[in-house]
Amino acid sequence: MASGDDAPNVAVLGTTGRWDPDQYVRFRDERAQPFYDLAALVRRHPGMRVVDLGCGPGELTRWLHVELQAGETLGLDRSPEMLAAAAAHAGGGVRFERGDIVEFAASGGHGPYDLIFSNAALQWVSGHATLLPQLRSMLAPGGQLAIQVPFGGDHPARSVLGEVAAAEPYASAMQGYRRPGGAQPPDWYATRLYELGASEQVVRMNVYGHLLPSARSLVEWFKGSALTPYRERLPEEMYGALVEAYARRLVEQFGDDRPYFLPFNRILMWARWES
């Protein structure tokens, strides 16, 4: 869990952009529902200019474009693998571009936009106190900002992962790396949006209950997210050993209940500016 203070420096946390689209969509329905819930907060205005930050494999970006009757939608992602999958959903006003969210926001990102949308991506970016004003500056009059970030840093399964990765030989191979949390508490975001002059805003915490086959299945869940920085930094054989050690610790910690219920916290926020 992140603290209430937010470092001013905006930076990408923990991942170089090498993602596995197949692993990410293994829990397709569970990962898609927050996207749909976030989209439901958006005010529909046909013809909008939209950007989806951290678009992933692109299927939901295409859905958003059609659902909103947008005029133009740009999907941005830094993963070549994700963009290769997204290419199948390009066309008809939708295009995809490789880019870093930090650099994109700092440069103005080809704005202005009527909607800046980001689902489960900004937790990989630090310095939200700096990032949010940058995103606000990219909006056209009447523009909207819609963001969803996981807030699961306090789940025991993440603590177990940190403990396993802090042991040898992984700690030396990772040079002491431990993934920091990028998300702030909901009231922090509500305050920042107010300070940025939002005319309207909604900030809420949703707890999504996911029924997994077993506690060991948490490994497959986190392979699509929290384990990615470790896969990028460790030799293949050592990464496999870390995953197996993590799986054993999960069973020790949570037992072998079948199925296993995973409550997963996510922050959904939406804001609109009149001018």
Image (spheres, rainbow, N blue to C red):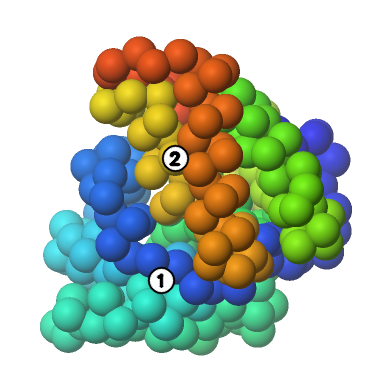
| Residue appearing at x 49%, y 35% in the figure | 247
| Residue appearing at x 28%, y 44% in the figure | 27
Question: CB under 8 Å between callouts 2 and 1?
Answer: no
Question: Label 2: few (<14), some or many (≥20) within 10 Å?
Answer: many
Task: Kindly indicate the quadrant of the structure image that contains residue 258.
Answer: top left
The disc label shown at residue 194, or none? none
Q: Is residue 111 visible?
A: no
Q: Is residue 168 visible?
A: yes
Which residue is nearer to you in this view: 232 or 66? 232
Percent across and percent down for residue 40 are 28, 42
Calculate the distance from the C-alpha at mark 2 to the C-alpha at mark 1.
31 Å
Quadrant in which the C terminus appears: bottom right
Circle count: 2
Quadrant in which the N terminus appears: top right
Compared to 218, does 171 lie above or below?
below
| Residue appearing at x 57%, y 28% in the figure | 249
Label 1, secondary structure: give it: strand
The disc label shown at residue 51, or none? 1
Left or right relative to 183: residue 2: right
Compared to 40, does 138 lie above or below?
below
Compared to 94, does 116 lie above or below?
above
Task: Kindly indicate the quadrant of the structure image that contains residue 212.
Answer: top left
Residue of label 2: 219
Circle 1: residue type: Val
| Disc nearer the start of the sequence (2/1) | 1
Circle 2: residue type: Val
